[in-house]
Amino acid sequence: MLATPGAIRSVRATTHAAAIAFRADPRLAGGRLVLDDGLSQTIATLAGASISVNSLWSVHRELAEGKLVRVLPDYWVDDQSALWLVYPKSNVLTAKARIFIDFLMDRIGNAPAWRTP
């Protein structure tokens, strides 16, 4: 079944939809898995695809819950990472932008959640 990108919004396009059943296949996939974003890495690692290099801030909850474990705890990637908030140059911030910045500062602030006991 093929559809155009906007078909999901059309009642006519979805009235003749068909269910497709999938089944799990336990065979391991061959090849190398290359991902370019942290969330996909985390999801793949949680699914058992392999090990990954993640920032502690992005997986601190999974580590605390025991869903992930540090494989090489004595080794660190010195990335000097920072979280940057980038927005258009303007003398005046919109209310939405100001509220979002305040939210991030409240949630992250100066004491990273992944380092808080």
Image: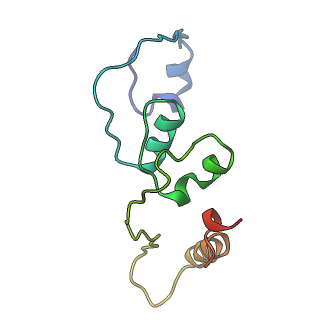
Q: Is residue 24 above or below residue 115?
A: above
Determine the residue located farthest toward the front in the rendered image.
Answer: 74
Residue found 56% across the figure and 24% down from its top: 11
Quadrant where the N terminus sits is top left
Residue found 63% across the figure and 77% down from its top: 102
* Residue 101, percent from left and from top: 58, 76
Q: As rendered, which of 4 and 23 lies closer to the eye?
A: 23
Q: Is residue 3 above or below residue 77?
A: above
Q: As rendered, which of 23 and 114 lies closer to the eye?
A: 114
Q: Is residue 2 above or below residue 5?
A: above
* Residue 42, percent from left and from top: 50, 43
Q: Is 109 left, or right, of 40 in this rendering?
A: right
How is the rendered protein coloured?
A: rainbow
Residue found 44% across the figure and 30% down from its top: 49
Q: As rendered, which of 83 and 71 lies closer to the eye?
A: 71
Quadrant where the C terminus sits is bottom right
Determine the residue located farthest toward the bottom in the rendered image.
Answer: 91
The number of numbered badges drawn on the structure is 0
